[in-house]
Image (spheres, grey):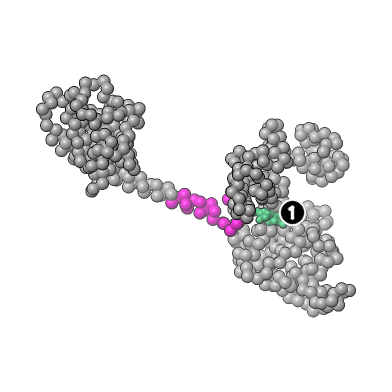
Amino acid sequence: MLGASLDLNKTLKGAMKVLSDFLDMQRGTVALVEGDEIVIKAAHGLTIEELQLGRYKLGEGIIGQVAKSGYPIVVPNVGDEPVFLNRTGARKDINKSNIAFLCVPIMFKRDVLGVLSVDRLFADSRVSFDADLRLLKIIASLLTQHIKLSRQVEQEVQELIAERETLKSELRGKYRIENIIGKSSSMQDVFESVHRVAGSRATVLITGESGTGKELIAKAIHYMSARAKQPFIKLNCAAIPEGLLETELFGHEKGAFTGASSVRRGRFELANKGTIFLDEIGDLSLGLQPKILRVIQEREFERIGSEKTIKVDVRVIAATAKDLIQLVGEGDFREDLFYRLNVVPMFLPPLRQRMEDMEELIAFFLDKYNKENSRNVEISQDTVSAMAKYWWPGNIRELENTIERLVIMLPGRIVHPRDLPLNIRNFTKEVVENRITPLDKAEKEGIIEALRTTDGVLVKAAKLLGITPRQIGYKVKKYGIRKGIS
Ligand SMILES: Nc1ncnc2c1ncn2[C@@H]1O[C@H](COP(=O)(O)OP(=O)(O)OP(=O)(O)O)[C@@H](O)[C@H]1O
Ligand SMILES: [Mg+2]
C-alpha cells in the first residue's frame, strides 16, 4: 500500500483502510505535526467534516499528548477517560464502553512527525493491548519512511518549481536596463536591440510618439557602450533657430561674424569620442540637412569662419516623433540623410499598446516620487484599472507627471479614482459607459483635434490624419462628433 504511490494523503488513507479491514481497528487516523499543532491528515471511517475537526494543540487531548511526549498511550476504555476529547464527534453513535483507543507516535530519530491512532473494538475488557501496540509501532515506523520520502520528493518538486520560476523570470527580464521599465514583448525587443547595438558605433534612429522614452533609450545606448565615460551631447534640432543651429553644431572661429568674440566649439566637437544625440531630427531644416549628412558620412566638418577640417569620432543617435518616411515622401526630409540615420531603427510603441507595463511603471514612479517628497502615497487597484483605460497621448511622460502631481497634491494616503485628473476620469467614464474601446476613444479624440486645427473642414482634417474624406465622414458619424464641438 505504502509503496504504491507518493501521494501521501492517498497512501495514508489506504493504509488506514487496511487496518480497519483486517485488524478490527476502526477509524484509523494519521495526524501530522504542523508547527505547534497536530492535524489529522488521513483517516478511514471519518467523514470529511469529521476529518476537518481533527486539529489539536500539542499536548491537547490524547493525540496531542502523544505528539508532545513521543510515547504511546492506550486508553483501554474510551468511556472512562476524561482526557478523551472525541473532537471529531465520530463515536457519538457507538457505545463507548467497548472501544479502546490506541495511539502511537510516528517518529523520525527523536522528532515526532505525527501520530497513528486507532479505535480497537473489543468484547472482553481484560484483553491486553501489547500485541496491538507492537504492530502499530511497526506500522508507524513504515509510515515514517514513507512520510520522509514523500516530503523529500515534495520539497524537490517545490525547489524545481521555484528554480523554473527564477529561470523564467530571468529570461523574461533578460534584457534589463536599469531604471527602464519594460517587460512587454515590444519593449523587450527594444532592450535586446539596445544590448546588441551598444557595443558598436552604428547610427541609431529612435522613433516613437512624444514621451515614449526616446531620450532615455538614447542615453542607455551611450552608457552601455564603450563610450560611457565620454560625453553624451544632446542637440534639440527643433528648439534652436535655424540661424544658430549651424554654430551650435559646428562652432565658430574668433571673429567669424559680429559677436563672435572668441572661439567656440560646436556640439560635434564636444561630442568627440562620445555620442551626439540629435533629438527631433524630423524638424531639421532642409538647409541644414546636407551639412549634417556630411558629418555623419565623413565624420568631419569645419568651424564657421575656418577652412580647417576637424575630424571627430562620434556616435550618432537621432530621435523623432515624426514619420520620417512620410516627410521624405513629401520632400521635407532628404532621402539620403534618412538612410544614413536609419542604420539601426528602433521603434518605441505608445504606452497604450503596452499596457502590460502599466502596473510596474506606476509602482516605479510612485516609489520615485514618494522618495523625492518623503511621502507614502499608494494607488488603489481600481484606480490602476481606471488608468489602464485611458489612452495616454503623452505616454510615459504623461503618466509620470500624473503620478508626481498625485503624490504631491493628494491630501490622503491612498489614490482613489476620484483623485485622478478630470481628463482621465472623463475619458475612462466615456469608455466604460459607451462601451467603446480606448483605441476608438483615442481615434475620436484624434479626429476632434484634427477638426479643431482645420476649423472643422472635413477634407483638410482627413488629409491631416492621412485618411480619405469618406473615412472621416464615416467616423464622424460613428463617434457622434458634432460641428462646433469644443
Ligand atoms: N520605460 C520607461 N521606464 C521608466 N521611465 C520611463 C520609461 N520611458 C520613459 N520614461 C520616463 O518618461 C519621461 C519621458 O521620456 P523621454 O524624455 O525619454 O521621452 P521622449 O520619447 O524623448 O519624449 P519627447 O518626444 O517628448 O521628447 C522621462 O522622464 C523618462 O525618464
Ligand atoms: Mg525627447
* Looking at the image, residue 181 lies above or below residue 220: above
* Secondary structure type for disc 1: loop
Tell which quarter ligand 1 is in.
bottom right
Q: How crowded is mark 1: few (under 14 residues within 10 Å), some or many (20 or more)?
A: many
Name which residue lies at 77% across and 66% down.
Answer: 293
Please provide percent x and percent y for residue 41.
Answer: 32, 35
Between 140 and 338, the one lying in front of the other is 140
Q: Mark 1 points at which residue?
A: 321
* Looking at the image, residue 195 lies above or below residue 473: below
Please provide percent x and percent y for residue 260.
Answer: 85, 74
Please provide percent x and percent y for residue 479.
Answer: 76, 34
Name which residue lies at 54% across and 53% down.
Answer: 173
Q: Farthest right residue?
A: 258
Q: Determine whether the beta carbon of the residue marked 1 sits less than 8 angstroms from the nearest atom of ligand 1.
A: yes
Between 388 and 208, the one lying in front of the other is 388
> Which amino acid does the dot numbered 1 rest on?
Ala
Magenta-span inclusion, residue 74: no
The boundaries of the magenta stretch are 163-184
Query: In terms of image quadrants, where is residue 140?
Result: top left
Q: Is residue 445 visible?
A: yes
Q: Farthest front residue?
A: 411
Task: Report whether 194 appears left or right of 328.
Answer: left
* Looking at the image, residue 224 lies above or below residue 373: below
